Amino acid sequence: QVQLVESGGGLVQAGGSLRLSCVASGSPFNSLAISWYRQPPGQQRELVAHISPGSSIDYADSAKGRFTISRDNAKNTVYLRMNSLKPEDTAVYYCFARRTWDASVHWGQGTQVTVSS
């Protein structure tokens, strides 16, 4: 069973930065394509960024130019560096993994990011 543990959320002022981490266990890390999603209050969950096992990267338009996703295969960790944060970035951020060999999907428990104006 794949387990995903997020950390790094918190309260930050507009214009500030945070780095989220997602540590994966229970499966070879290079078998996992990992994404960050977020769910703002009262809204649906939305994709923020994605990184494949080979480090191909995609971003939602809202993240382009401000957020950077990366993976450290030695630490079984994916990071989301968020700069120039805005109040509208306030959300619970979730780590999501799809295992390549069986297409199983897995979610972390989420970490709260709050951006004050």
Image (cartoon, rainbow, N blue to C red):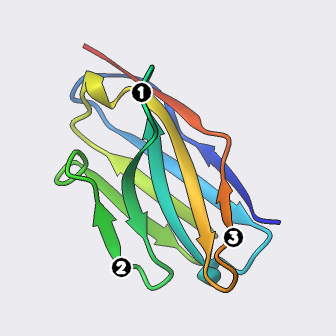
Q: Is residue 9 left or right of residue 106?
A: left
In the rendered structure, which disc, 2 or 3, sits on the residue that comes first in sequence? Answer: 2
Where in the figure is residue 72, as x and y percent of width and height? 52, 72
User: Seen from this angle, which residue lies furthest top?
Assistant: 117
Q: Amino acid at mark 2?
A: Ser
Foreground: 24 or 13?
24
Foreground: 34 or 5?
34
Q: Amino acid at mark 3?
A: Ser
The disc placed on residue 43 is: 1
Residue at horizontal 30 percent and vertical 67 percent from the top = 58
Where in the figure is residue 46, as x and y percent of width and height? 40, 44
The disc placed on residue 104 is: 3
Foreground: 73 or 45?
45
Q: Is residue 116 above or below residue 55?
A: above
* Secondary structure category for the residue under label 1: loop
Classed neighbour count for the residue bearing mark 1: other residues with Cα under 10 Å, few (<14), some (14–19), many (≥20): few
Q: Which of the image's four quarters has the N terminus?
A: bottom right
In the rendered structure, which disc, 1 or 2, sits on the residue that comes first in sequence? Answer: 1
Foreground: 28 or 61?
61
Residue 16 lies in what quarter of the image? top left
Q: Report the mark closest to the observer, 1 or 2.
A: 1
Classed neighbour count for the residue bearing mark 3: other residues with Cα under 10 Å, few (<14), some (14–19), many (≥20): few
* Secondary structure category for the residue under label 2: loop
Residue 68 lies in what quarter of the image? bottom left
Residue 106 lies in what quarter of the image? bottom right
Q: Report the mark closest to the observer, 2 or 3.
A: 3
Where in the figure is residue 66, as x and y percent of width and height? 21, 48
How far apart are the two marked residues, 3 and 1, measured between alpha carbons? 25 Å
How far apart are the two marked residues, 1 and 2, measured between alpha carbons? 28 Å
Q: Is residue 93 above or below residue 67?
A: above
Classed neighbour count for the residue bearing mark 2: other residues with Cα under 10 Å, few (<14), some (14–19), many (≥20): few
